Amino acid sequence: MTRPFEALEGARRDRIEFERRTAQEVAKQRQFEREERAKKAAEARREAAEKRGAQPAGPSGKREAPPTTDQNAPAGEANP
């Protein structure tokens, strides 16, 4: 004997589970596409910087200033 309400409830649960899995897969695909676009953009920026001949910045993100000398020191001696 078939119980119609149980069959309907089982079908409803299956549909909800399918929709949940589908939504998760779509979200994963979007995340993957965003990461790929970000990687391509970073690579394009890196290539553009190389093309311009720019030197990459140091680890702090700032370029170091050249060392200065003491104006009062005798010639040939630098201030430590």
Image: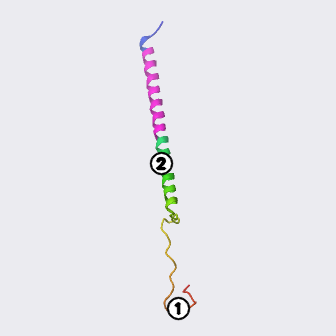
Mark 1 and mark 2 in contact (Cβ < 8 Å)? Answer: no
User: Outermost residue toward the top?
Assistant: 1
Q: Amino acid at mark 1?
A: Ala
Secondary structure of residue under mark 2: helix
* Residue 34 rendering spot, x and y as whole percentages: 46, 44
Q: Residue 69, relative to residue 8: is it above or below? A: below
Q: Residue 28, relative to residue 72: is it above or below? A: above
Q: Quadrant of the C terminus?
A: bottom right
Along the line of sight, the residue nearer the viewer: 54 or 79? 54
User: Outermost residue toward the right?
Assistant: 76
| Majority secondary structure of magenta residues | helix
Q: Residue 59, relative to residue 40: is it above or below? A: below
Q: Which residue is mark 1?
A: 73
> Which residue is found at the position 51% from the left and 77% from the top?
66
Residue 6 lies left or right of residue 74; in this view the side is left
Q: Is residue 25 magenta?
A: yes
Q: Which residue is mark 2?
A: 38
* Residue 31 rendering spot, x and y as whole percentages: 47, 41
> Which residue is found at the position 50% from the left and 66% from the top?
60
Q: Residue 48, relative to residue 75: is it above or below? A: above
Q: Which mark is residue 27?
A: none
Along the line of sight, the residue nearer the viewer: 27 or 34? 34
How many discs appear? 2
Q: Amino acid at mark 2?
A: Ala
> Which residue is found at the position 42% from the left and 11% from the top?
4
Q: CA distance from mark 2 to mark 1?
A: 52 Å
Magenta stretch bounds: 6-30
The quarter holding residue 12 reads top left
